[in-house]
Image (cartoon, rainbow, N blue to C red):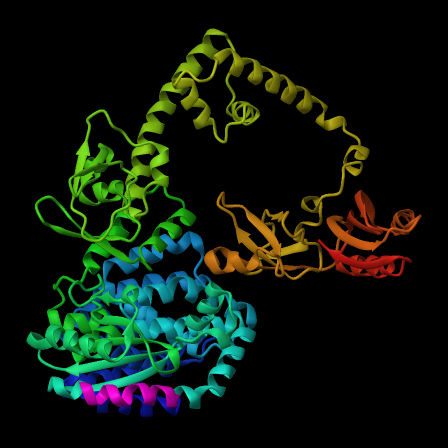
Amino acid sequence: MNPTIPYTYRQLLQRHGGLFSYDERRALRTLLASLHPEVASDPALPGNSLADRLQIVQIILDEIGLGKAAVLSVLLHGEVERGHITTTEIDDRFHTSVDGIINGLSQVEGLYRRNAAIETENFRKLLLSFAEDVRVILIIVAERLFVMRHLEGVDDDTRQGIARECAYLYAPLAHRMGLYAIKSELEDLSLKYTNRTIYKEIARKLNETKRSRDQYIAAFIGPLREKLRVIGADFEIKGRTKSIHSIYNKMKKQNTPFENIYDLFAIRIIFDVPPAREKAVCWQAYSIVTDMYQPNPNRLRDWISIPKSNGYESLHTTVIGPQGKWVEVQIRTTRMDEVAEKGLAAHWKYKGIKGETGMDEWLRSIREILENPELNAIDFMDEFKLNLYDKEVFVFTPGGDLHKLPKGATVLDFAFHIHSELGCRCVGAKVNGRNVPIKQPLANGDQVEILTSPAQKPNRSWLDIVSTSKAKTKIRQALKEVEYKDAEIGRETLMRRFKNWKVELDDGNLSRTAKKLAYKTVSDLYQDVAHGKLDLHTVRDAYQAIADKHEAATSDSETKSAELYTAREPDVTDAKEDVLIIGADLKHVDYKLAKCCNPIYGDDVFGFVSINGGIKIHRKDCPNAPQMIARFGYRIIKARWSGKAAGSLYPITLRIVGHDDIGIVANITSLISKEKNMLLRSISIDSNAGLFQGNITLMVTDTKDLEAICKKIKQVKGVKSVTRA
């Protein structure tokens, strides 16, 4: 047995012994001792062995605050999956229901068993299991935190994928659950593995300035502590440095180096008072702080009067401290601090699991997205992201009911928030007694009365007006219904006319006709036919031309000579099939090379799943790569070149700068023409003030040939630089 198992188990008993009765502890020890080899072995990834599971239990107990059912589910869901024990037996032995949690964990584990990082097409299934029991989300967040803490021994490709996924999905999930400490740690660890250089640099500078920061925090807290004693309540003051990820974001947002970031730390004042005194004490402390230090009025955040939807309560303000430095001050109570640290689990502890936390409403909105089968996986991911890092505005109905909406929500969002039918018929609103259009953004405190018309119906431009996922989903559903009906009418009209013309309709040729007429799909063509926007004679003529051409091409296909194929301009898609391996050693996968960076054989590359579902291959140093990875990390898949370059040629553009000497261009083109396995596709030269700048597009086999030709061009007299465009 792993020697850490008894130690970890004893630690858990010491801190949480009251969680299980004596008989239950004995039953649990018996079950753990009989775990099967596949559970106790060391897996390729951290998180599956018994020792790892016990550490995950530590996280869910100490850092999140879940209870007995969650502990049993983490330890035993593998045994249930393998049929060694049933959820009914667990319920009988330990007097708690684990069925919902274990089912959710098994579904998620099944998805991850296929790949270390979740695949985009499986994301809907992942959220389905989340939406059944919110504790599944909390456990999975704990498991991913454990994995992130133990990623050093994992291979780099897997580590990068998991780190990107954590930054994109699990850090925002932790934020939504109110687990702010875990959210910050996940963001820091993700940055550590995806941009190690930046992470180490900020960490080094934080370490170098630690002493001066500690001195500053002490100077700030000292006089404040004396003033706060007059409130007559027990309290503590903590000073903390902002996370590395948060500092990095500030550096990017402000486009400034580390040395110019002044608000590196925050002060937290925590009072231990009964619930009845909480608001009064917090506002009294706020008054003392702002009397001592000048506040920034635009940075007051009151989440005590109206808590966040995940239960977070606190007063935040930013003040100018000694030496003119900005300091963030957070004021809260012990109860509020526990909710802030442990999120939903702590909120349930104080208000009961059926208490209004906003989470039921959030999970309902997730289910509404899941109900839309027409939403593709990538749009679904984007819709889900709208529900994570949302800031809120609070608006009122004419009857005085309070509703929370994301910041930036419009009148149309509010209409769909109240009811789908109200949204579909919305023509505007009265906001604070004044008529406004459907695109009017809402502000805190607005009183909104929706105006409707029975003749109104959604149109595609509404998708640009709304910002909430519920409104987008309902608008798409309504548009789909209208488009489907119109397409059916158009199809029937077209088939009837073609039958009258005695033209046989072939789906393949009709699809080609739609593309020739600049339609993305045949359905779009049908809709324009239904609306009378497309002349049927135009469709017939285009269809007949394509049908005749296709028939002629089919009859000639067997007599084509090999020269027709060899005469084509070389293209990477005609190369050896397995020249590029995508994902987890997948072969024969269709892909295209990105035009933005023109990767060639030998470049370090990655795959990017585009909106239409195709895969585009980019260089890792592509200028668009940082933005793609940051915004769409879930679409990134690994790719690598395989074997040898199989004689295929890839387009590459070289930017050449040099002195405008006579014959320099001729020398360069002559040099290229002598190279084997290389073609000159195009050249453009611009001369100004004795210098020339030129772009030369070549067809090359691989990076070795590219490096060789670049080296030779640099040696041409007059050439100053050769760079890859």
Q: Residue at x 83, y 57 (%)?
A: 709
Magenta span: 214-227
Q: Is residue 221 magenta?
A: yes
Instruction: Please identify the residue farthest to the left as the structure is shown.
Output: 276
- Give me the residue at 22% from left, 63% from top: 308
Give the main secondary structure, helix, strand or loop, of the magenta stretch: helix
State left or right for residue 525 relative to residue 342: right
* Quarter assignment of residue 607: bottom right
Kindly tell me whether residue 203 is visible in this rendering: yes
Please name whichever residue, 199 or 508, is drawn nearer the observer in this view of the structure: 199
Tell me if residue 208 comes above or below residue 471 in the rendering.
below
**Is residue 467 shown in magenta?**
no
Q: Position of residue 660 (x, y in %)?
A: 87, 51
Residue visible at 56% across and 75% down in the picture: 197
- Residue 714 image-quadrant placement: bottom right
Q: Residue at x 16, y 88 (%)?
A: 229
Left of 452 or right of it: where is 529? right
On the rendered structure, is 121 left or right of 698?
Answer: left
